[in-house]
Image (cartoon, grey):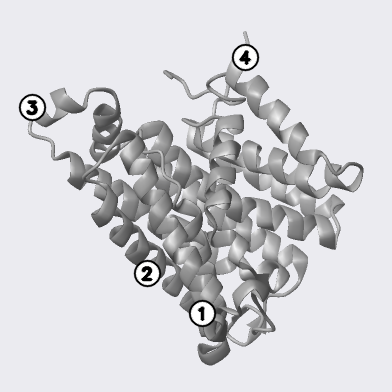
């Protein structure tokens, strides 16, 4: 007779992530640690995209603007307030929620193609402000030279420490979004994606439920964005451009647009090709395109398929 000890799904995944972090810390080097720290933070933004698109049916091209604006707010304010970790996280979450609320007010009354176009316009307006307001954002050159992240006078600048910090934030974001998706509000969001007319007939307010999802993903995306500039001590307008939002969608589709775990895999695959494969060929984007097309044709649910999808 054999005994089977099975961990609950959330605990098992957290244990797996924790073990992976320990292995990377033992075997990795400075460059790998910073690369993975960046991947973890971008994966948080991809998870937010997966919630909005995969579970809410809201194809947004403004999530990159939310992520990038929080990064700019943190980088700029650190020059005056210092780069305290908790202050940066708070500013990032507030700026992310505020921008998400403004975009939602302008776009959530629409749906489908019109919603996507409105989010694209909102995102590009943010990019225009960042690109033109050179005195604050540095314009096309971006921002650099701001203080290093710190907690109680202790600088968090070592690559391994940044990786651990980014990983902890990513695990916390995953748990937060997972809890939301399993809550009544998250289930209502999925119901509105599949049967909006029936849900509204039952008394659910479409715009309010979607607004809650947009605010939550704005907070999570803003928190990740607030730490992003401190990984390489640099932030550029690329992070608020609509093309970055499209990149997040590509990562989500490759990993699994309805799977939060797929966000990590999609981000790692894309960034690995962008960082490492680009050293061998200038046509690394063609590789991304082939993987994307193959995923859509042969694995439409992505590399990691959510149960029940």
Alpha carbon separation for disc pair 1 and 2: 21 Å
Task: Looking at the picture, tell me which residue is in the foreground, 7 or 115.
Answer: 115
Mark found first going from the N terminus, 1 or 4: 1
Residue 81 place in picture, x, y as percent: 51, 89
Q: Quadrant of residue 248?
A: top right
Residue at x 85%, y 44% (from the top left corner): 282
Front label number (4 vs 2): 4
Give the class, few, some or many, for how many residues have Cα within 10 Å of label 1's Cα (few <14, many ≥20). few
Give the class, few, some or many, for how many residues have Cα within 10 Å of label 3's Cα (few <14, many ≥20). few
Give the class, few, some or many, for how many residues have Cα within 10 Å of label 4's Cα (few <14, many ≥20). few
Callout 1 touching callout 4 (CB < 8 Å)? no
Mark found first going from the N terminus, 4 or 3: 3
Q: Quadrant of residue 250?
A: top right
Residue at x 53%, y 83% (from the top left corner): 136
Front label number (1 vs 2): 1
Q: Which mark is residue 133?
A: 1
Residue 260 is at least partly visible in this image: yes
Mark found first going from the N terminus, 1 or 2: 2
Alpha carbon separation for disc pair 1 and 4: 45 Å
Task: Looking at the picture, tell me which residue is in the foreground, 132 or 175.
Answer: 132
Mark found first going from the N terminus, 2 or 3: 2
In this figure, which residue is indicated by the disc labeled 4? 298
Mark found first going from the N terminus, 4 or 2: 2
Residue at the bottom extreme, as displayed: 80
Report helix, strand or loop for mark 4: helix
Q: Quadrant of residue 205?
A: top left
In this figure, which residue is indicated by the disc labeled 3? 201
In this figure, which residue is indicated by the disc labeled 2? 94
Q: Count all numbered tags in the image, as a single digit.
A: 4
Front label number (1 vs 3): 1
Mark found first going from the N terminus, 1 or 3: 1
Residue at x 15%, y 28% (from the top left corner): 199
């Amino acid at each position: 007779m054999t005994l089977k000890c099975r961990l609950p799904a959330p605990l098992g995944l957290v244990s797996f992530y924790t073990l992976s972090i320990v292995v990377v810390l033992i075997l990795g080097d400075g460059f790998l640690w910073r690369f993975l720290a960046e991947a973890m933070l971008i994966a948080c933004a991809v998870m937010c995209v997966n919630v909005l698109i995969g579970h809410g049916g809201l194809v947004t091209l403004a999530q990159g603007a939310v992520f990038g604006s929080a990064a700019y707010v943190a980088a700029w304010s650190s020059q005056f307030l210092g780069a305290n970790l908790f202050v940066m996280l708070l500013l990032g979450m507030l700026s992310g929620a505020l921008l998400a609320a403004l975009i939602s007010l302008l776009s959530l009354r629409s749906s489908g193609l019109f919603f996507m176009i409105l989010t694209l316009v909102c995102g590009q307006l943010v990019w225009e402000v960042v690109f033109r307001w050179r005195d604050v954002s540095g314009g096309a050159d971006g921002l650099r030279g701001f203080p290093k992240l710190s907690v109680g006078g202790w600088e968090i600048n070592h690559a391994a420490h940044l990786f651990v910090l980014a990983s902890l934030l990513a695990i916390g974001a995953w748990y937060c979004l997972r809890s939301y998706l399993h809550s009544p509000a998250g289930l209502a969001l999925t119901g509105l994606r599949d049967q909006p007319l029936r849900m509204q007939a039952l008394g659910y307010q479409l715009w309010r439920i979607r607004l809650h999802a947009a605010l939550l993903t704005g907070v999570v995306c803003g928190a990740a964005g607030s730490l992003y500039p401190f990984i390489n001590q640099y932030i550029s307008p690329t992070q608020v451009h609509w093309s970055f939002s499209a990149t997040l969608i590509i990562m989500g589709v490759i990993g699994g647009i309805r799977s939060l775990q797929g966000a990590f895999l999609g981000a790692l695959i894309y960034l690995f090709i962008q960082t490492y494969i680009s050293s061998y060929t200038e046509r690394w984007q063609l590789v991304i395109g082939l993987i994307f097309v193959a995923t859509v044709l042969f694995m439409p649910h992505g590399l990691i398929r959510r149960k029940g999808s």
